Image: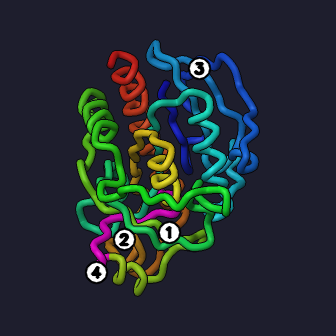
Amino acid sequence: MLAIIGGSGLTQLANLEITSRQIVRTPYGEPSGPLTYGRLAGSEVVFLARHGYGHTLAPHEINYRANLWALQSKGVKRVVAVCTVGGISIAHAAGSIAVPDQIIDYTWGRKSTFFEGAEQPVTHIDFTHPYDEGTRSLCLAAAKDANVPVAASGTYAATQGPRLETRAEIDRLERDGATMVGMTGMPEAALARELGLPYAVLAVVVNSAAGRRESKDAIQLDDIAKIIEETMSKVRLIVAKVVDHHGRS
């Protein structure tokens, strides 16, 4: 079964024929909300709103472990996550969509592993390629089928939030090789890898990062809201094709 994790601007899936909602108890506490089961494009899918269905959880407050554990425990075999980001590189203009292939983690203080405590063995996972290539290919094929242009690569810088970054911080991220910046990409990707869940991200660029292009002097939050509203219709088209392709695979 495929799971879609929705971010800012995607707290529900349009055209999802909901069959049930389930509250899942986990050893790591409460997920962001109940799992919503339904059918989309003729295939079964489960949806989870990362920030809660009322969008009340800030990036650093999200229980990423509970979210991923809940999905895996209910039989999910693949995860596609939607994240909003700021574009650092000129290749990621506001209103565009990307499927990143790399990530740099700048977060701190988040519960970032299932392997902790005296009862757990020390476990190292390979994270050379943080996103599952098969799931990335699924997203790219779905976007092509939906006739929505997407960037086929990019490096996601995961920052702590909830504030946006300074211009100097964005300069540093760019020197490090980041091409986009967001707040929810980690530890979600690493936790999915620990659970053996194939995972990829649809990154929705809702603004240029601080000091870049239209955000040279300041980031206009009203403009972000407009771009989210405009771009999420394209994301929903891609997601529907992702579900369809996954159901036929």
Q: What element carries label 4?
A: helix
Residue annotated with mark 3: 38
Question: Going 45% across and 41% down the picture, which residue do you hit?
Answer: 196
In the displayed image of the protein, which residue is found farthest to the bottom? 168
Q: Relative to the observer, which residue lies in front, 173 or 114?
A: 114
- Compared with residue 48, is residue 21 higher up or lower down, i.e. above or below? above
Residue annotated with mark 4: 175
10 Å neighbourhood of mark 4: few (<14), some, or many (≥20)? few
10 Å neighbourhood of mark 2: few (<14), some, or many (≥20)? some
Type of the residue with mark 4? Arg
- Residue numbers of the magenta segment: 174-185
Q: What element carries label 1?
A: loop
Disc 1 or disc 3, which is closer to the eye?
3
Q: Which mark is residue 220?
A: 1
Asked if the stretch drawn in magenta spans residue 184, the answer is: yes
Q: Give the left or right position of residue 232, taking residue 146 as reference.
A: right
In the displayed image of the protein, which residue is found farthest to the top? 42
Q: In which quarter of the image is residue 208?
A: bottom left
Q: Relative to the observer, which residue lies in front, 51 or 118?
A: 118
- Estimate the spatial distance between the alpha carbons at disc 1 and disc 3, rounded to whole Å: 36 Å
Q: Give the left or right position of residue 203, taking residue 16 as reference.
A: left
Mark 4 / mark 3, whichever is N-terminal:
3
